[in-house]
């Protein structure tokens, strides 16, 4: 079973976001239906490395954002022979890695020794088949001491049948971002529950019309709101069985909350990356539940929000819940090929790329490694951009991602973008659309070989 984050889609992306391949960008609306070609499932055979050769060169596939890091590693390790290939990283709906791996499987050669993917769902196919592309890194490939240094749950999307088939590059845990200057000016208190969030959203609509506390038009809206509500929109229960039940009270409560605020106008039906939103709403964002990368990528680089205004509060919970949970919008993976003739070099590179302060401390997104995350947060503090220290909030949220939302072969974001967003724009409510959303998920899951339960 695999529980964890999934890749996210959005109708449009800015250059600033596209630069960060690990943000898990998914398809444009026109190609949002693209899903991986199914591969043979079932437990992988016992892993037996191919004959190893210590001086064998390794081929590394990475996106444009990760390539400078790979080159930095190469410069620091001149004895390691490497061939670096820049590719899409499977961002923006691309499916290049699996397509190429399927070709290499047929020809019997060509697999990259190391590959980065911005799509966490890639682990669902890379770990499967008689000879999976991905090597089980927990079997004396990546040191156990390294794997144990990742945030709790960070490696869950990599675990299948008890083995770990990838290493997380970064996380994208959701928090409650807010404009401290506006909150203070309006005399508002930062909410701690979803009920308080709704009440404040209604108050904002009345007292400061035009200001927003959230959006429902981003195709990763499910990851921000419904995942945090513990809605069982996709929970893999074993093998190819998945529970999809949008009639569950934990789904309907969030739909009703958002419907109320959409009707009031304080939750937008637009995406935060649309030109219209950036032009007309960027300076009217009071609060925005969203991923850790919103801080620098959205507010700083896209909205151009001045320094000293944005802060981050803990993920919200419903008053009746005893524990705070949150969702996640992104986070990349590193695979080591089971066909590699130099697993030691491949492992050393992946370990350095995911844990080294030299690289991760200044990366664009929150590192999955706890040690690297500490260095990253210290660097964020040195920028002086945020109104308050965001370190403790982001660290805590990294451990609060609800494990009941599973990585699958289908894209939740693509389904939301093609099914729910058009319905909202036509005037329907989220609550009225839950049935169609349920059907769309069920149909896609069934087409990919899942048995859907409710």
Image: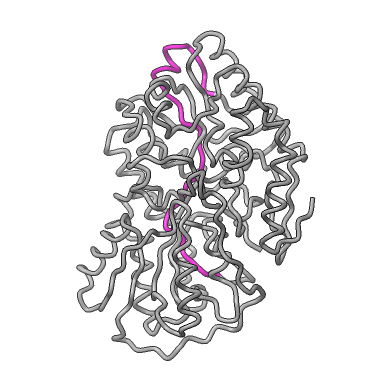
Looking at this view, is 301 or 357 the one in front? 301
- Residue that extends furthest to the right in the rendered view of this protein: 454
- Residue that extends furthest to the bottom in the rendered view of this protein: 51
Going by the image, does 111 lie left or right of 174? left
* Residue 75 visible, this angle: yes
- Decide whether residue 27 is among the magenta residues: no
Going by the image, does 148 lie left or right of 402? left
Name the residue located 60 percent from the left edge and 48 percent from the top edge.
Answer: 412
Looking at this view, is 100 or 164 the one in front? 100
Looking at this view, is 361 or 423 the one in front? 423
Residue 135 horizontal/vertical position (percent): 50, 76
Q: Quadrant of residue 327?
A: top right
Looking at this view, is 318 or 6 the one in front? 6
Name the residue located 47 percent from the left edge and 46 percent from the top edge.
Answer: 172
The quarter of the rendered structure image containing the N terminus is bottom right
Residue 63 horizontal/vertical position (percent): 35, 59
Report the magenta residues as a range. 164-190
Residue 371 horizontal/vertical position (percent): 39, 55
* Residue 326 visible, this angle: no
> Is 114 located above or below residue 269 in the figure?
below
């Amino acid at each position: 079973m695999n529980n964890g984050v999934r890749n996210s889609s959005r109708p449009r992306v800015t250059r600033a976001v596209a630069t960060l391949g690990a943000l898990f960008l998914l398809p444009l609306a026109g190609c949002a239906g693209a899903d991986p070609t199914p591969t043979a499932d079932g437990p992988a055979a016992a892993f037996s490395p191919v004959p190893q050769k210590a001086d064998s060169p390794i081929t590394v596939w990475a996106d444009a954002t990760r390539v400078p890091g790979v080159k930095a590693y190469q410069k620091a390790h001149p004895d390691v022979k490497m061939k670096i290939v820049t590719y899409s990283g499977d961002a923006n709906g691309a499916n290049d890695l699996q397509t190429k791996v399927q070709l290499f499987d047929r020809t019997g050669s060509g697999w990259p020794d190391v590959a980065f993917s911005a799509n966490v769902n890639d682990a669902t196919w890379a770990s499967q088949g008689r000879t999976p592309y991905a090597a089980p890194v927990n079997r004396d490939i990546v040191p156990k001491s390294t794997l144990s240094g990742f945030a709790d749950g960070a490696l869950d999307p990599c675990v299948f049948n008890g083995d770990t088939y990838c290493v997380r590059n970064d996380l994208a845990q959701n928090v409650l971002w807010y404009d401290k200057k506006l909150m203070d000016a309006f005399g508002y208190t930062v909410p701690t529950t979803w009920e308080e969030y709704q009440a404040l959203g209604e108050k904002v609509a009345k007292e400061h019309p035009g200001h927003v506390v959230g959006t429902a038009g981003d195709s990763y809206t499910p990851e921000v709101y419904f995942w945090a509500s513990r809605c069982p929109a996709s929970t893999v229960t074993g093998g190819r069985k998945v529970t999809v039940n949008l009639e569950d009270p934990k789904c309907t409560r969030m739909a009703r909350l958002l419907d109320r605020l959409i009707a009031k106008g304080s939750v937008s039906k637009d995406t935060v990356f649309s030109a219209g939103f950036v032009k007309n709403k960027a300076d009217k964002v009071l609060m925005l539940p969203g991923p850790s990368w919103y801080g620098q990528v959205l507010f700083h680089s896209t909205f151009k929000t001045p320094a000293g205004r944005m802060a981050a509060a803990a993920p919200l919970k419903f008053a009746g819940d005893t524990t705070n949970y949150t969702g996640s919008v992104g986070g990349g993976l590193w695979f080591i090929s089971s066909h590699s003739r130099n697993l030691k070099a491949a492992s050393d590179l992946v370990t350095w790329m995911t844990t080294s302060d030299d690289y991760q401390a200044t990366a664009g997104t929150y590192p999955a490694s706890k040690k690297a995350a500490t260095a990253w947060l210290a660097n964020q503090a040195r920028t002086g951009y945020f109104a308050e220290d965001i370190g403790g909030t982001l660290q805590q949220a990294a451990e609060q991602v609800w494990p009941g939302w599973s990585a699958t072969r289908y894209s939740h974001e693509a389904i939301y973008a093609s099914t729910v967003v058009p319905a909202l724009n036509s005037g329907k409510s989220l609550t009225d659309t839950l049935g169609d959303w349920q059907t769309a998920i069920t149909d896609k899951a069934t087409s990919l070989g899942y048995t859907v339960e409710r």
